[in-house]
Structures are given as C-alpha cells and as structure tokens.
Amino acid sequence: MAAALMLLIAACGDEPTTRPADFVNGPWTPTLVAGLTVTDGPSGLKPAGPAAQSQAENGDGGPADQLALAALDDVQAYWIDAFPRAFDAEYRPIRRVVSYDSATGGGQLCGVDTAGLVNAFYCSDDTVAWDRGVLLPDLQEQFGELAVVTVLAHEVGHAVASRLGDAGEGTASIVKEQQADCYTGAFFRSVAEGDADRFEVSTGPGLNQVLATLFAIRDSAGRSFDADGAHGNAFDRVTAFQKGFGEGPPRCRAIDEAEIADRITQQSSAQDGDADSQGADLGIGFDELADLETTLREAFQPLNEGRIDVDAAPCDGTEKTSPVSYCPGTDTVAVDLPELRRVGAAAQDGGFGDFAAFAEVASRFSLSVQQAAGLSLEGLLAAQRTACLTGAWAATIQADQQKALRLSPGDLDEAVAEMLTAESLIASDVSGASVPSGFARVKAFRDGFTAGIDNACAKQYR
C-alpha cells in the first residue's frame, strides 16, 4: 500500500488529460457519468411521447399496464436496433406479453399460480409477464415511473440472453441475472442519450431512481451467490448495470461464471455463527471506533497520521459536516457519536446500518490521507477521490478476516444506500459537497474496492 500512496503523491502535480478509455470504462470527472454530462432534468414518460403500441393478454388497459407497455415498446425498439449491431443477428420481438393482478389471481402462468405472485418475470416459452395489481403500482409509488421501466428492461434482458443461446439450463442463476442487469444498463444508456421515443432519464436524479430500484429488489444479506434464483446484492447488481451502461451489450454477454467468481461480493453466510458474520449491525462506541482506526491506519500506511476524536475542539476555517468532519489544521476526524449512531442504526430504525456509519468515518480519514499527499480537499474531484479511497479501505477489511472490523453480508449495500441519498458524506469533499450523481459516487467507490489505490484512485481521480 505504501507504493500506491507514493503514486498518489506523485500524481497530484500532474495535469489531467482526457483519454478515450475513461469514457468507456466510467466517469473521468465528477460531472460525467460514463462520458455523459450529469443532468438533473425530467425523468419518466415524455409529455409528448407516442402512446404504447403493444398489447398484453389479460390486461385491463389501466395506468399500470399502459406504463408497462410503453416501457416494453421502448426497450424492444432499442434491441431491434442494437442487437444486430452488437451481435450481428436480428432481434425477434417477445412472443407473448401477459398482465395479471396478484391480488385477485387468475390461474396459472408459466406453470405458476398468479394469486399472490407479486413479481415480473420472463419464462422460457418467450413470455414476459407482470403484476399490475401490486408490484407495478408499488414500484411507481416508491421510485417513480422509471422503476417500472427498469423491471421490464431486466425481463427483456433475459429474452436477449435467450436469443443468444446464453440462458440454458446449465447457466447459473447469478450469471443470467447479472447479464439481465447489464443489458438493462445498456438500454438506459440509449435513454440517457435521448434515443428513446417514450421515456427520458437524467443522469443525476433519474439514474438514482433506477439504481434505487435495483437496491430495493436485491437479494437479502447472507444469501449465497450460487443459490438457485440468486440475483445479486445491491452492490453487485449496480456493478452489472454500470458495465452495460458504460460498455454496451457485448460486455454483458461476456459475463460468465469465471467473472462472477472473481468479482462478486455477495457471499454465503459465514460459518462461525457470530453476529457480525451474519450481517447484524454492531454497536458504535469507543471500542468500535478504535478498531476502525486500526484498520484505517493499516490501509493507508504510511500516510496515516490523522486521528479520530469524539471530543475534538471546533475547527477553524472549515465547515463542519455531520456526523463526522475533518479538520485540516489539527489533522483530526471529529465524530459526533450520537449522530453517528443514528446513521448506523438498522434501516427499520431510520439508519443505513453500521458499515455506512464506519464508511462515513473512513471517508473523513481519507481526507487526512489526501492532505498528507498534498492533494486538494475541496471540490467535486476531491469528493470522488474520497469515495474511491473509502472503497479501497473497504476492500482491505474484506481481504483479511482476522481483522477486528471486517465486512459482513449486506455491508456494501449499506454503503450503496448512503451514496444514493441526496447528500452522501462518503462521496463528498471536506466541506460536504457531494458528487452530483449517485451513479458516479458508487462507481468511484467500486473502483477503489476492486482496483485499489494505485490502479484506480491515484490514476483516475487526480
């Protein structure tokens, strides 16, 4: 790690240059999302867009069905154009489209009783189906119209894989689902570029809605990635989506079991049975902060002179951020312990979970590291670099299970949840100014987590 931090110091004096690969692989600056400018305009159905042309068996013609059919039309129009360019073959539209109401039932569909089936799915006879009674209205109410588009794009993604012969019985569930999430990202890239007839999406709040949808329908903490029906945790689902958004359909087809085994973060529950390994939240007190500081010093040596203090004096000249702030003058990470505990509470209690709280502390500690490296602590590039360094720290507590503080199932999802809020401390500068796009925040964190300081933070975010 020392060599990596020396590279970070050396990089600080370089003038950044634009390289084509930066736009292919992800954001190069905090104001870009995979090469597209961050926007905060309208997202959802275009006011003057054409009506849906598709029809659904058993549909009621209501708002949920109309929204789903409009989504299906745009998604399939994308694949009619993109499939031949990506795979040198013609795209065949979905054979059968079915709507049902899980609240009332309506018989069998793809061999399953639809009563109580709050779901949307693709089945092997080339059917796409959705629950108009509960699922689609709930998704729209929670996350907006684009949540419905996300779900339908994912199901059509399965149809794409089927047409390519990539969805056979021997294909693991997680591979199928990660490919479908990736194909969803490829479709949304076209929407973000303005190519869809019926829908539009901003690369700021709009993409946040899409990522929040993937977060909401993630696998539960502790579910093994090789379990039948596994889709991936939020971190892994967002990763697949971003690969499709940034690199296009051929990258999605390249997802296979070898890649999954190498990069997937969703592991089965640990075997020792302790609460932390099972994903339960730890308490947040003096002992836990001491353990956290130990892991931070190990991760960022030799630039690890900052200290964590719950009784820090007010900092002159720097705006305080809550619940954790960094004071450059004293090289101190000041923690408001009661507020940090609120962040670290379980989701049902209004928090994000313990790892999100620890990651917020880690993000402020990384500012000490950046100051020692002679880097600016102000501005959105510093905010993005902070997210990257926080991700790099997170990887170090995953790699060594002997550490007093370590990743457990669901932890990375807590960080994703924090980074999708309006103001993320994990991805903010010393004054609390956040990277404007949740997509870019998560991407920077993931770059640090997967590639580390020398291959990501010191090269891309300088």
Image (cartoon, rainbow, N blue to C red):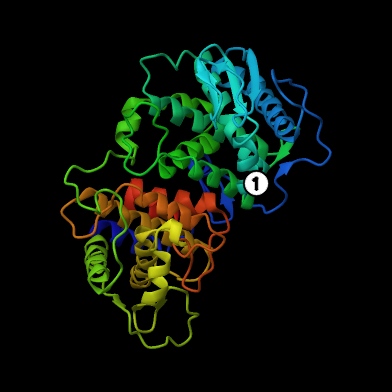
- Report the residue at 27% width, 38% height from top: 268
The number of discs equals 1
Q: Is residue 82 above or below residue 354?
A: above
Q: Quadrant of residue 10?
A: bottom left
Whether residue 324 is visible here, answered yes or no, is: no
Nearer to us in this view, 112 or 264: 112
In the picture, the quarter occupied by the N terminus is bottom left
Rendering coords of residue 135 (x, y %)? 59, 36
Circle 1: is it few (<14), some (14-19), or many (20+) Cα within 10 Å?
Answer: few
x, y percent for residue 371: 37, 72
User: Can you name the residue that lies furthest to the right here?
Assistant: 48
Residue 457 seen in this snapshot: yes
Pointer 1 residue:
141
Nearest the eye: 427 or 114 = 114
Write down the quadrant of residue 12 in the picture: bottom left
Q: Residue at x 66, y 52 (%)?
A: 39
Quarter residue 5 falls in = bottom left
| 109 up-or-down from 388: above or below | above
Q: Position of residue 55 (x, y in %)?
A: 74, 20
Q: Amino acid at mark 1?
A: Glu
326 sits left or right of 308 in the view: right
Name the side, left or right, on which 263 lies relative to 143.
left
Query: Could you say whether the residue bearing mark 1 is in a helix, strand or loop?
Result: helix
Classify the position of the C terminus by image quarter. Answer: bottom left
Residue 316 image position (x, y, % from top left):
45, 88
Farthest residue in the front direction?
Answer: 104
